[in-house]
Image (tube, helix red, strand yellow):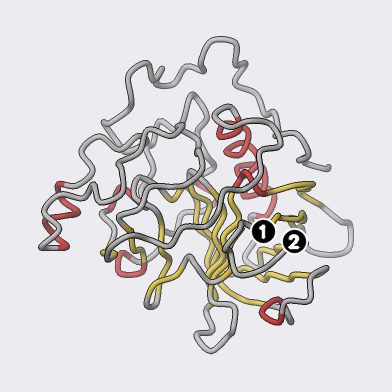
Amino acid sequence: MSLNTAHADHGVLIHAGECIILFSDNVLVEFYGNDTPEFKGSKNGRMYLTTHRMIYNSKNTSDNLRSFSFPFIALQDVTVEQPMFSANSIKGKVRAQPNGNFIGEVKFKLTFKSGGAIEFGQAMLKAAHLASRHMSADAPPPPYMPPSGPWYAAPPPAYAPPPQGYYGWVPPYAAFPDQPSPNSVFVSNSPPPYPGVMGVAYPPAGGISGATSPTGALAHGYPNAPGYPGNNPPGYPGNMPPPGYPGGFAPTSGMSSSG
């Protein structure tokens, strides 16, 4: 996990090849178990589920915590909770990435004020499970690496995931019909430092072509990015799960969905 590394200007900053799966505009975030000053107090902002992580972006530009990255590889003990007398929420803890602006781990609670905590949590666990097939068990989070080069407004595929889903799993798009504003999503030249839902076959750093123009760079820079509509990698089975995968929900070790 990294602190204040996933925002740019007034929006979210994602890696080259990373795709936003779900977006919720009204989420309350609470951190505890760590004395880092930026974690103090309740936070109100936007939550993104991507092919590689969850990202929180604050709506308050004066908050010391502007953004927070939750890589799947760093999440532990995640539960989707449905209490009888309070709002549904997602709880868990996340380990720090080296160079990620804090040390150790921090616990979190996400409350979706407009609803959707159960759907978002189950989707996150599913995405984490798919990503876990491309990483070693109990692998430590890799060091945070600052983006290389400039960043640009992202092309629509970065926030319009393929309608056929991923390996037979179709995220609950209907529960989250809103999309982030096109002028609020930015992409860097750097590929993700950790695997995602589709593995690690992402453009190398500096792989954007036509970088003299943001429009030209984004229109032509990602012709083969996995997960973009019409650009599935070799062997991608469309709506069929891969061999040996039943297509059912199977949370990553250490994560669960409580009923």
Q: Amino acid at mark 1?
A: Ala
Tell me which residue sits at (50%, 33%) in the image: 170
Location of residue 108 by image quarter: bottom right
Residue for point 58% across, 32% down = 135
**Horizontal arrangement in the rendering, residue 139 relative to residue 147 (left or right):** right
Q: Disc 1 on helix, strand or loop? A: loop
Q: Residue furthest right?
A: 84
Name which of mark 2 and mark 1 comes first in the sequence: 1
Taking depth in this image into account, of 169 and 217 the one nearest to the observer is: 217
Residue 96, disc? 1
Q: Residue 163, position in %: x, y?
A: 39, 36
Within 10 Å of the Cα at label 2, are there few (<14), some (14-19), or many (20+) other Cα atoms? few
**Residue 118: where, in percent of width, then height?**
69, 49
What is the quadrant of residue 45 in the picture?
bottom right
Vertical relation: 37 (above or below) 193:
below
- According to the picture, the residue beneath numbered tag 2 turns out to be 104
Tell me if mark 1 has few (under 14), some (14-19) or many (20+) residues whose alpha carbon lies within 10 angstroms of its own. many
> Where does the N terminus fall, quadrant-wise?
bottom right
Q: How many marks?
A: 2
Q: Residue at x 56, y 60 (%)?
A: 69
Question: Residue 20 versus residue 25: which sits nearer the camera?
Answer: 20
Seen from the viewer's position, the closer of residues 72 and 240 is 72
Q: Secondary structure at mark 2?
A: loop
